[in-house]
Image (cartoon, rainbow, N blue to C red):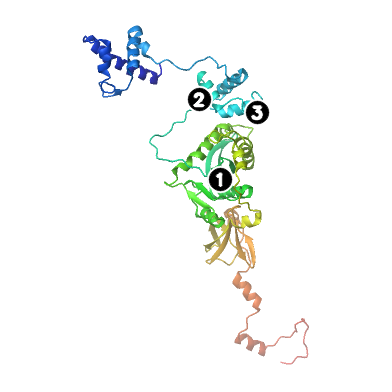
Amino acid sequence: MDVHIKQKALLRHAAVSVVLAKVVAGVSTHVAVGEALQNGGIVLSNGQRIRVSRRTLFRWVADYKAGGFDALVPKSKKSNTPTRALPKAFMEFLIAQKTKDSEASIPDIISAARILEIIKEGEISRTSAWRAAVRLNLPVLNVQKKSNSTKRRFEYKHRMQMVFCDGKHFRAGVRKRKRVVFTFIDDSTRRVVGLSVCRSENKRDFLRGLYKVILRVGKMNCLFVDNGSGFISNDGYLICARLGINIINGTERYPEGHGKIERYNRTQYADLLRTLDGDPAIDASFASLELRIEHYAFEVYNNRHHESLGKSPNDKWRADSLPLQVIDNKEALAREFVITKTHKVSADNIVKVDGKLLEMPLGYAGTRVHIACDLLHSEARVLHEGKMILLNSVNLNDNAKTKRSGRLSITQKKKCALGPITTAARIAFERDFPTMVNAAGDFMANKQP
């Protein structure tokens, strides 16, 4: 017997015992039930109160007298009888899918049945399919909810007024590579407007996803993020300030904002991400995974009927009349993701940018230089001799085996450009011992000292 069901039967037996104890003392069942319930419920010996109606208590007493303790065990409401309201072909498909994959969600099974032409568009609702799964005692995922919550729901009226971004960790490929997908979802329409896939949460891939969103649909008014490692960098705040985007980090004022993006993450994981773990047919490269997840988000999820909207995210997006803040100049947008920082060059001509050791041109040791950091491509450049040159990572292994270069430093190059240095001693020597050849190298035989 299930522990939860057994506990219910024991509580019923305790309530019946209070009534029968009074009956044994010579009181009628009608009076005993009234006395047991006169304080608003039956108080047991451990202080627990059972609130029950008179009719229910009479029924429990009658059941116990007729069948003993087993008669108090709650009857299961689940049935193995298939429903007649849904097509037989869909019921067979539902049973097969749940048997094969117990974590498959009901909306995903309905979408798969529609793609395989088992049912037509709109023929079956999610509620009917869920009830059928419960009747057949199929595994249904129940999400535990927190009680005593003080959060308040909110929703912006128009598209791109508020966009949520969050990272979801998953594994892909036969070698179970660790991957993260940054997803940008619009608050008003629940439409996925962009995403990026990377190895771990970092500012570069978050900003790359933001860049793709702006190129695709335009700028948002507000961007909501949490305290993840990819969002806490000051560089991200600086870029958003340049673009005129109000970025909100998950503070106590906006705890309710996590709900919508977290709900999408659960749906995305149930429909797609969990199927990538350990599959030898899956290419775990970032570009391949990004293409696969974008197809799911843009072609499947955005076109699927959304329960809270009453329509698909794409339908609500197209029905919104608010103009988008589209940026046409791709190069100008990319320049906004380049920031300049001042760094000190070490004695061995190395500069450290975002944790990476980069090798500077000779002559800058001990000086402070301005480094232009391209956050989209993780590149750094410095102005050297009138040109912006790309700084490469230092190769410590090669430096251990390669001879030092004989190139001149910047100070030495300036001396060479000025020509030989002339002092009084040199002038006196050239006066007393003049040269015997001219500038062309010819011997001057007739020249007298």
Q: Residue, x 47% and y 28% (percent of image)?
A: 142
Image location (x, y in percent) of residue 224: 50, 47
Q: Are marks 1 and 2 in contact (CB under 8 Å)?
A: no
Q: Quadrant of the C terminus?
A: bottom right
Disc on the earlier residue, 1 or 2 = 2
**SS at mark 3 in the image:** helix
Q: Residue, x 58% and y 60% (percent of image)?
A: 372
Disc on the earlier residue, 1 or 3 = 3
Q: Which residue is mark 3?
A: 115
Q: Residue, x 57% and y 29% (percent of image)?
A: 107
Disc on the earlier residue, 2 or 3 = 3
Q: Nearer the viewer, mark 1 or mark 2?
A: 1
Image location (x, y in percent) of residue 114: 64, 27
Image location (x, y in percent) of residue 206: 55, 48
**SS at mark 2 in the image:** loop
Which dot marks residue 158? 1
Residue situated furthest bottom in the rendering: 448
- Residue 27 is drawn in which quadrant? top left
Distance of mark 1 from mark 3, alpha carbons? 31 Å
Which dot marks residue 140? 2
Q: Amino acid at mark 1?
A: His
Total number of numbered discs in the rendering: 3
Tell whether 443 sits left or right of 308: right
Disc 1 crowd, CA 10 A, few/some/many (<14, 14-19, 20+): some
Q: Nearer the viewer, mark 1 or mark 3?
A: 1
Residue 230 seen in this snapshot: no
